[in-house]
Image (cartoon, rainbow, N blue to C red):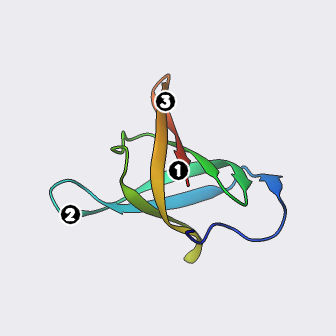
Amino acid sequence: MNSLTRGHAHAPSDKAVRVAWVDEGGQLRCAPGKCIDISDRRVHVEVLERIVLGTRVSLSVAGNLIAGPSVVKYLTQCGASFIMVLE
């Protein structure tokens, strides 16, 4: 299992996060996101960029890793943004 946040079984969050991943071309990418919900198995994050399913991503807040490496399991477009589910 990857290293998702420890602690509460289910904890909502509205924290701004930094999402980092390596794109299909091998380039390191970073983007701002908003953590919507955190549990001990999944993290829901809102981002403005489409990140390919199966991509390994890490999340950090103020330089501190909070989840990662985690895998994008689901991605749903919601208006101009995307909601991704990490496991």
Q: Position of residue 51 (x, y in %)?
A: 36, 45
| Residue at 15% from the left image edge and 56% from the top image edge | 25
> Which amino acid does the dot numbered 1 rest on?
Gly
Q: Secondary structure at mark 3?
A: strand
Q: Residue furthest right?
A: 8
Circle nearer the N terminus (2, 1): 2
> Which amino acid does the dot numbered 3 rest on?
Thr
Residue matched to label 2: 27
| Residue at 56% from the left image edge and 55% from the top image edge | 87
| Residue at 82% from the left image edge and 58% from the top image edge | 9
Q: Secondary structure at mark 1?
A: strand
Q: Tell me if residue 25 comes above or below residue 67 in the rendering.
A: above
| Mark 2 to mark 3 CA distance (whole Å) | 23 Å
Circle nearer the N terminus (3, 1): 1
* Nearest-to-viewer mark from 2 and 1: 2
Q: Residue furthest left?
A: 25
* Residue sitting nearer the eye, 51 or 86: 86
* Residue sitting nearer the eye, 77 or 79: 77
| Residue at 81% from the left image edge and 69% from the top image edge | 7
Disc 3 packing (10 Å; few <14; some 14–19; many ≥20) = few
Find out whether the residues at labels 2 and 1 contact each other: C-beta distance under 8 Å.
no
> Which amino acid does the dot numbered 2 rest on?
Gln
Q: Secondary structure at mark 2?
A: loop
Residue matched to label 1: 33
On the rendered image, what quadrant is the N terminus found in? bottom right
| Mark 2 to mark 1 CA distance (whole Å) | 19 Å
Q: Position of residue 69 (x, y in %)?
A: 47, 68
Side of 76 where 62 appears, left or right: right
Circle nearer the N terminus (2, 3): 2
Residue matched to label 3: 76
